[in-house]
Structure formats: C-alpha cells, structure tokens
Image (spheres, grey):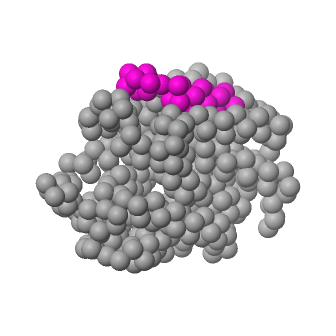
Amino acid sequence: MATALPPGTAFSSYQKRVVALLAFLQFSVILDFMTLSPLGAFLMPQLHINTAQFGVLVSSYAYAAGVSGFLTAGFADRFDRKRLLLFFYVGFLIGTLLCGLAHTYTSLLLARTVTGVFAGVIGSVVFAIITDLFAFHQRGRVMGIVQTAFSASSVAGIPMGLYLANHWGWNAAFLLIAAICAVAGTWIVVAIRPINAHLALRPDRSPLHHLLHTFSQPRYLVGFATTILLSTGGFILQPYASAFSVNNLGITLAELPLVYMLTGVFSIVSGPLLGRLCDAIGNFPVFMLGAIATIIMVVIYTHLGVTPLIWVVVVNCLMWVGISSRMISSSALVSAIPTPTDRGAYMAISSSIQQVSGGVAAMVGGMIVTQTRAGLLLHFDMVGYVLVGTTLITLLMMYFISRMVEGGSGRAVVAVDSPLA
C-alpha cells in the first residue's frame, strides 16, 4: 500500500522513477493528440474529406475524452490507481493502434473516438497519483517535470508526424506511438507499486452518490470553474497559432516546425525550473508572475505583423514561459483542493471539464477569427483579448484558492491536504 513519503527537499529513488514514468505517459498521450493536426494536409486528399470533416476528427477525440472522464468520476476512487491507470492506458494503446490501421474516414473517426474515451481518464489518474505520492511542497517540482510533456510533444509531434507521413504515410506516426505505448505500459506494470491507501478511507457510497457528492462541495466548484477559464483561455488561441504565424507573420511552412521545436526545447528547460520556483516561493506568486507575463506577451503576439523568424521564436518562448508558469502553479495548487477520498472523482471531472471547455473554446475561436481570400487571419487580436480577460479572472480565483489550500502562508492546510496526500 503506497502512501506519500515523509516531507523532504529531495525525492526518493522510487519517487524519481514515478515522476519519470508519469511524464513519459503524459508525453505519449499528448503526442498522439498533437500528431493529428499536422497530418491534415495528407489526410484530407487521401481520405477525400473536407476541412469540416477533418475538424470532426479532431473534436471527436476531445468530446469523447470529456464524456469518459465524467462517466468515470463516480468509480475513480474505488480502485487501486495503478490498476486504473493500466486499464485506461491499454485502451488508449488499442485506440492508437486502430488509428494506425485505419484507411477510411469512418474507421479513423471511430478509432479517434475510442482513443479519446481512454485518453480522457489517463490525465486525471496521473494527477491523482501525484497528489497521493507527493507532499504539497513537492508538487511544484513534479508538475514542472510532468508538464514538460506538452513541450516535448510540440518538439516531437509536428516534425515527427510530417516526416513519417512524407516517407511512410500518415498511418506510420500512430503505429510508432502505439509501439511507444507498449513500452510505457510494461513500465507501469514493473515500476509502480500498488496505490490504494485511499481505499481504506473511502466511505460507503454508490458511484452516483460519490459523483453527486463531489459536485456538491463548494470548494470543488471553485476549482472546476477555474479549470474552465484556464482551458478556455488556452484553447481559444492555440488552434489558430500556426495559421497566424504563416499567414500574418510571414513564417514559411518549412520554418514553422522550427518555431515549434525551438519553443518546445526552451519550455523543456524552463518547466522544471518553474516547478522548483513554485516550491521555493509558493504557487500563487508564480501564477501571478505567469499571468502578468502571459497578458503582456499575448497582446504583443496577437498584434504582430510580418516579423523575422528570430523574433517570432523569442516572442513564442516568452509567451510560453507565462503559460507554463500558470499551468504548473495552478496544477500544484488545485491538487490540494480535494480530500483523499474524492481525489479520483475530482480529477476525473476536472479532466472532463478541461476537454469539453477546450473543444468549446476552439469552436468559439473559429467564430471570432475569420480568413480573407489571401489567407490573412482577421480578428486574431480579439481572441487574445479573451485570453487576457480569462487570465485576469483566474488570477483572482487562484488567489482565493491559494488562501483556501495554503492558509495564506504558503503552507498547506492539513484539513485540505492531509498527510496521505
């Protein structure tokens, strides 16, 4: 039975193995999601589909993930977290393999839906495990490492997808990811001990009762609302960034992967440093600095015209520092909101809300942004202002969350973040 190890400044060897594995799992899941986007130029002509149908392929994953996360919430705290993680990761592997074997639009749509169903729960289980095994003052560093999966997938996902599609067809990328998942799944079996301390604390509730109970807690609702705004702000801008870079900033299609790679490499280096900063000075101060940086850089970025490549990379890197600071610090803070008996359910609902909010935000962004016949994106500055607005609101909400879980002193409140955390 695994519980959190005594508080300390250094991680144990077991904790280090767990962090490395969880970061790798997140990398494989996000890599699968990131790989589809650059394959549109190959998929649409080969499968004879239009842009609307390709959009359905992308959104089917997100909505399936959102629904599965919500439906799993009532059961999430009734099982050993290792077994739960392994079950959904194997399902994710199967879904990814089906994507690699698909050769029609219908079969690929079904495969993406299956992949989303299982992927939608993995992230919530990962964050529940982090909260179970690491003390509050260690989670900034853990989140800083695990969140680098987003950056690493940016570095690998787009260039890898394009390279494999050019040489072996668009299916090859998914087959490679499935092989990576097989290695990671074996690693889960071998490296992670049972994580079941929460089972001894679980009250005798039905899954439906447990779900309703989680929704009825006022402090949980604050966390859910913050997640909605954080996801909305991010996803309303991100899907259109590549088109904005090419059509408005003058970046060529050949240079675009380089922008993502350099930004990703910078983020891989800065992520763990930001995590250490969270543990050193507190999560909310880092979130506040990240929010300020995000607002400044988003306003600059969304108002750029034709810009030299080097300055596009610099602006992207600085903007991502702000975004990463918010992601890492908010993940660490929010992890302290649920009690041990509700962690699985809370994280599952939060993951579901994040997926659905992201899908809705992307659709809203598509309604705001328009494109001229020459390809120029119009009103991109408006989605930037939406992100600025959500950032300001979440800054206020994260202040109250910080007061709730840290007691305003930078240390976790025992009632919320118990020794089993």
Relative to 76, 372 lies left or right: left
Q: Nearer the viewer, residue 307 or 231?
A: 307
Relative to 384, 99 lies left or right: right
Expressed as whole percent of the image width and height from the top left, the position of residue 54 reads 33, 36
Q: Could you tell me which residue is drawn at 44 percent across and 24 percent down?
A: 103
375 up-or-down from 194: above or below: below
Q: Can I make out residue 253 in this image?
A: yes
Q: Could you tell me which residue is drawn at 31 percent across and 76 percent down?
A: 307
Most prominent secondary structure in the magenta stretch? helix
* Segment tinted magenta in the rendering: 84-110
Q: In the rendered picture of this protein, how many numbered marks are placed on residues?
A: 0
Q: Does the magenta stretch include residue 188?
A: no
**Image quadrant occupied by the N terminus:** top right
Q: Could you tell me which residue is drawn at 29 percent across and 31 percent down?
A: 49
Q: Can I make out residue 415 in this image?
A: no
Expressed as whole percent of the image width and height from the top left, the position of residue 174 reads 55, 36
Q: Which of 216 and 46 is in front in this view?
A: 46
- Quarter-of-image position of residue 185: top right
Expressed as whole percent of the image width and height from the top left, the position of residue 368 reads 20, 53
Q: Which of 71 and 6 is in front in this view?
A: 71
Expressed as whole percent of the image width and height from the top left, the position of residue 317 reads 48, 71
